Every structure is written in structure tokens, then in C-alpha cells.
């Protein structure tokens, strides 16, 4: 008999911030979204057969979103979270840039005086920088 998927994971509730725009009043706000983090256990549960052990080897940690709607802080209307992702793998989440890095890059690109100097990028090859010869 096959084991339930929840037997392979430990569940822990988690709250993450998300920035969303209300479709009614068009104001953007930060909202707390409830998630459940399911972390893979260190070994398969007792009573697992060969099929369950093969399934266990392929499993990854993930986050499952519990909230589908939020209430606007300005107008008080409920709206759906405008994201089709209700499941995120934790290893994918680690590759995303964090907010502070994005803000620093935006500040550097806009030329703000307190921004650190941008990193020097390699030059483009000449075939991309020479002028066009026009249509013939």
C-alpha cells in the first residue's frame, strides 16, 4: 500500500511579505501571505516499500500558499492574489534576487549620488556597435 505524501514531509507554517496592487483602487501595498513549508524528512518513514523509497528519493522541499485572497488596506475590497504560483520549490526561491540587491541596482542605474558605482561590463563586439549601412 502506498503512503500518503505528507508522511514524507514535516510541515511548518510561515508568513511572507508580498507586494500587490488592488485592481479596484489601483494602490500598491505590502501584504502578509500565509504559506506552509514542507521539508523532506531525512529518511523514509517506516513501512515504506520500494515504490515509496523511489518516490522519496525524488522529493524536494517546497512552499505551499494558503491564502488566495487579500483585503485591500485602502478600499477594504477583497481581491485575488494575482499570481498563478501557489507552489514554490525552495531551491528555486534561493536563486531569486533579494529586494535590497534590486534596489541598489535600480539606484545605480538611475544615477543617484549615494549609489555605489556600477560594475564595469564587458564591451560589445564591433559587429553590434557599428552603424547601419541602410537598406539596399
Image: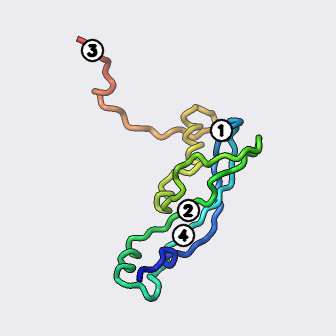
Mark before the other along the chain sequence, 1 or 2:
1
Assign a secondary structure to mark 4.
Answer: strand
Distance in Å between CA atoms under marks 1 and 3: 48 Å
- Residue at the top extreme? 136
Labelled disc at residue 64: 2
Asked if residue 81 is positioned above or below residue 94 in the image, the reply reads: above
Instruction: Quadrant for the C terminus, please.
Output: top left
Assign a secondary structure to mark 1.
Answer: loop
Mark before the other along the chain sequence, 4 or 1:
1
Q: Which residue is mark 4?
A: 38
Distance in Å between CA atoms under marks 4 and 3: 59 Å
Instruction: Quadrant for the N terminus, please.
Output: bottom left
- Residue at 37 percent across and 85 percent down: it is 49
Asked if residue 125 is positioned above or below residue 36 in the image, the reply reads: above
Labelled disc at residue 62: none
Mark before the other along the chain sequence, 4 or 3:
4
Amino acid at each position: 500500500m502506498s503512503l500518503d505524501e505528507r508522511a514524507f514531509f514535516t510541515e511548518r507554517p510561515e508568513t511572507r511579505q508580498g507586494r500587490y496592487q488592488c485592481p479596484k483602487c489601483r494602490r500598491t501595498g505590502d501584504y502578509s501571505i500565509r504559506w506552509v513549508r514542507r521539508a523532506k524528512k531525512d529518511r523514509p518513514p517506516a513501512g515504506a516499500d520500494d515504490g515509496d523509497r523511489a518516490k522519496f528519493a525524488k522529493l524536494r522541499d517546497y512552499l505551499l500558499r494558503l491564502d488566495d485572497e487579500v483585503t485591500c488596506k485602502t478600499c477594504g475590497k477583497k481581491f485575488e492574489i494575482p499570481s498563478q504560483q501557489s507552489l514554490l520549490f525552495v531551491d528555486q526561491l534561493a536563486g531569486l534576487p533579494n529586494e535590497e540587491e534590486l534596489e541598489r541596482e535600480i539606484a545605480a542605474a538611475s544615477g543617484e549620488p549615494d549609489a555605489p558605482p556600477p560594475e564595469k561590463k564587458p564591451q560589445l563586439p564591433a559587429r553590434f556597435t557599428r552603424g547601419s549601412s541602410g537598406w539596399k
